[in-house]
Amino acid sequence: MATTDTEHDLSHFGLGIDIGGSGVKGAIVDYRTGEFASERIKIATPSPATPEAVAAVVSEIVRGHNWDGPVGICLPSVVVNQVARTAANIDKSWIGTDVHDLFTNALGGTNVAVLNDADAAGLAEVSFGDETARSGAVLFLTFGTGIGSAFLADGVLFPNTELGHMMIGDKEAEHLASSAAKDREELSYKKWAKRVNKVLAEYERLFNPAAFVVGGGISRNSDKWVPLLTIDTPVVPAKLRNRAGIVGAAMAARSLIQP
């Protein structure tokens, strides 16, 4: 197990792993604070990002933390009954994969919990982030390789919404306004914010949320683009930013710890 004080009381700590289109990241999380209790390990997502190749990376991260407790894992896929139903920014061979069995076998029988990455981030924000996420109808969005979404009603999750794949005009929302699209097309924050505004305006029209909470790595620079948005619904930067997936995944692992 970890060589920090996690070895003294497993119930206070969990290992979370966030599988993304560009990197697989993992850290031990303190359930009392939502803070990392270890260094974060990040390994580039293999190409092609097949289930077996990614599972090998996950195993490497678990070994790197010297961890022998339950593991929570989030990935860019709709996950229903621990089976991947979609594959966003990972190999299409994930579709139909029993992800519980995949990771349990890769980790030598370790107990695992697997969920959608944006859902994990949204749950983490509810527990440890901005209080806006805990009250009313909130749309939590992550801007990264794609656009992840989590519907929250008074802090309760409606899972697997995948709004990044909704068509906005003739393009999927994430092809138009992810942070990857910003980088790929070398857009200024001003030009990119116009695209984000267009996406949020459509979400606003259809779902009428009380607020948007925006996360992902680009939320670190929220002061450069959130003030440029002109929609009526308040837009609040997430507090956990790109830590949220790891924290939410670790929280999923907590449910596997026997009292």
Image: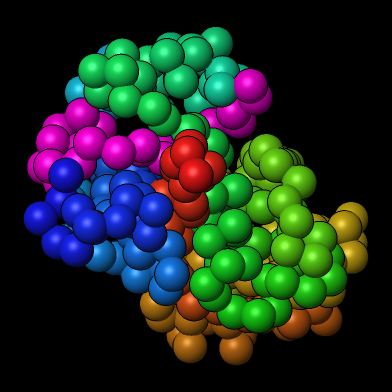
Name the residue at the front extreme: 259
Return the x and y of residue 110 as percentages of the image width and height.
Answer: 32, 25
* Residue 119 visible in this rendered orientation of the protein: yes
What residue is at 75 percent from the left and 56 percent from the top?
Answer: 156
What residue is at 72 percent from the left and 51 percent from the top?
Answer: 157
Rendering quarter of residue 20: top left
Q: Which color scheme did the rendering employ for the protein?
A: rainbow
What residue is at 20 percent from the left and 41 percent from the top?
Answer: 67
Q: Going by the image, does 56 lie left or right of 221?
A: left
* Total marks placed: 0
Instruction: Assess whether residue 59 is covered by the magenta stretch.
Output: yes
Residue 73, above or below 232: above
What residue is at 39 percent from the left and 53 percent from the top?
Answer: 11
Q: Going by the image, does 135 lie left or right of 237?
A: right
Rendering quarter of residue 66: top left
Residue 238, above or below 91: below
Q: Going by the image, does 230 lie left or right of 9?
A: right
- Depth check, front residue: 116 or 167: 116
Residue 123, above or below 101: below
Return the x and y of residue 229 as percentages of the image width and height.
Answer: 66, 80
Which residues, given as a range, are shown in magenta? Answer: 57-81
Q: Going by the image, does 208 lie left or right of 249?
A: right
Q: Which quarter of the rendering shows the N terminus?
A: top left
Return the x and y of residue 190 as percentages of the image width and height.
Answer: 52, 79
Residue 212, above or below 227: above
Instruction: Assess whether residue 8 is covered by the magenta stretch.
Output: no
